[in-house]
Image: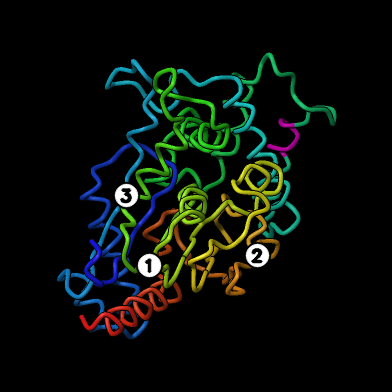
């Protein structure tokens, strides 16, 4: 783990528990396709063959299962009102940011309908009905064609359960047993273990970008490149003020930070991240827009297959391999 070989670490976002080996294979192949398209054919071949650098997939999705939950339960089971309130606040902020720029008339009409549900008669929904109301809001939101496509969310309850992972992480209050670390700490421990102690390139998706940012804040090893894709870090109402430490800044050992966002990715709000403070090296996130076209635009593999994303990742890994003599 600390032999000088560069290490590429993937950090996933919200979603159900999946086989980490299968996820790693899917992310690696998507990155290889992007590398091919970016003109890094030799690096893509090495990536597929597993040569010159290490790969790690920081998997923590299994930690979301509630204590005592049965294997057949879904991510939405045992959702608390506090979780549902934050889910509604997330949708409120995301739709408010997106509505002014929405070009498609049907999308504008749908977003306006969602916002009317969120604020009936211009006032927030009563807390007592938040669990039921959150399903109504998300059911309406899922009428947006890009969200109801296969491999996104099969229904409002599934979407709510996955979005609630953001709440459960940021509330930092849930522990498996009294006296044990809270779930956010256990998630960061998983990511920290994947980082190791040698040089790394980190690619983090969605909620994973928040987790990686907080984990890297205390990571002593060199981070040649930090890539965030589909990141909610800039969400001013929910995510930004809850990031630790405050105010949000580039982690100390990060040498470069690239932030990629897709214009059709609903989860991305305030994509520029211009208020992130620099580290001592003067590094701040540089945001770049990509237009991936097609369905499932929030998917990590869609981002990784983009040449604009894969190219810098492969270049950073090649630089580290040369520096280490690999």
Residue sitting nearer the eye, 318 or 267: 318
Residue 156's label in the rendered image is none
Residue sitting nearer the eye, 14 or 280: 280
| Quarter of the image where one finds residue 203 | bottom left
Residue 201's label in the rendered image is 1
Q: Position of residue 20 (x, y in %)?
A: 25, 47
Residue at the image position 36 percent from the left and 38 percent from the top: 61
Is 161 placed left or right of 196 in the picture?
right
- Circle 2 — which element? loop
Residue at the image position 56 percent from the left and 45 percent from the top: 144
Q: Classify 10 Å Cα crowding around label 1: few (below 14), some (14-19), many (20 and above).
A: many
Residue 193's label in the rendered image is 3
Q: CA distance from mark 2 to mark 3?
A: 29 Å
Position of residue 232 relative to residue 254, above or below, is above
Residue sitting nearer the eye, 296 or 188: 188
> Do the CB atoms of the residues marked 2 and 3 lie less than 8 Å apart?
no
According to the image, label 2 marks what residue? 272
In the image, is residue 115 part of the stretch drawn in magenta? yes
Magenta region: 113-118
Q: CA distance from mark 2 to mark 1?
A: 21 Å
Q: Earlier in the sequence, mark 2 or mark 1?
A: 1
- Circle 1 — which element? strand
- Circle 3 — which element? helix
């Amino acid at each position: 783990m600390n032999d000088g070989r560069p290490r590429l670490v993937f950090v996933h976002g919200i979603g159900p528990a999946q086989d980490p080996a299968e996820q790693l294979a899917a992310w690696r192949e998507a990155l290889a396709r992007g590398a091919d398209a970016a003109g890094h054919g030799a690096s893509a071949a090495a990536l597929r063959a597993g040569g010159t650098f290490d790969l790690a997939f920081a998997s923590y999705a299994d930690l979301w299962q509630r204590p005592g939950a049965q294997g057949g339960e879904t991510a939405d089971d045992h959702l608390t009102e506090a979780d549902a309130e934050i889910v509604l606040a997330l949708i409120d902020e995301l739709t408010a940011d997106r509505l002014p720029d929405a070009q498609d008339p049907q999308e504008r009409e749908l977003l306006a309908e969602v916002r009317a549900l969120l604020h009936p008669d211009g006032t927030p929904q009563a807390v007592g009905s938040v669990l039921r109301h959150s399903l109504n809001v998300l059911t309406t939101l899922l009428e947006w064609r890009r969200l109801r496509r296969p491999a996104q969310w099969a229904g409002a309850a599934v979407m709510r359960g996955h979005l609630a992972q953001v709440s459960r992480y940021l509330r930092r209050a849930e522990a498996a047993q009294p006296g044990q670390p809270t779930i956010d700490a256990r998630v960061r421990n998983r990511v920290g273990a994947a980082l190791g102690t040698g040089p790394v390139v980190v690619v983090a998706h969605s909620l994973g970008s928040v987790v990686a940012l907080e984990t890297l804040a205390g990571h002593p090893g060199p981070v040649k490149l930090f890539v965030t894709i589909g990141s909610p870090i800039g969400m001013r109402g929910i995510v930004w003020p809850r990031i630790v430490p405050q105010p949000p800044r580039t982690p100390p050992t990060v040498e470069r930070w690239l932030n990629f966002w897709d214009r059709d990715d609903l989860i991305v709000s305030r994509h520029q991240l211009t208020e992130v403070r620099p580290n001592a090296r003067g590094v701040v996130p540089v945001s770049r827009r990509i237009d991936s076209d097609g369905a499932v635009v929030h998917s990590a593999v869609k981002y990784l297959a983009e040449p604009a994303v894969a190219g810098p990742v492969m270049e950073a890994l090649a630089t580290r391999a040369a520096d280490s003599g690999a």
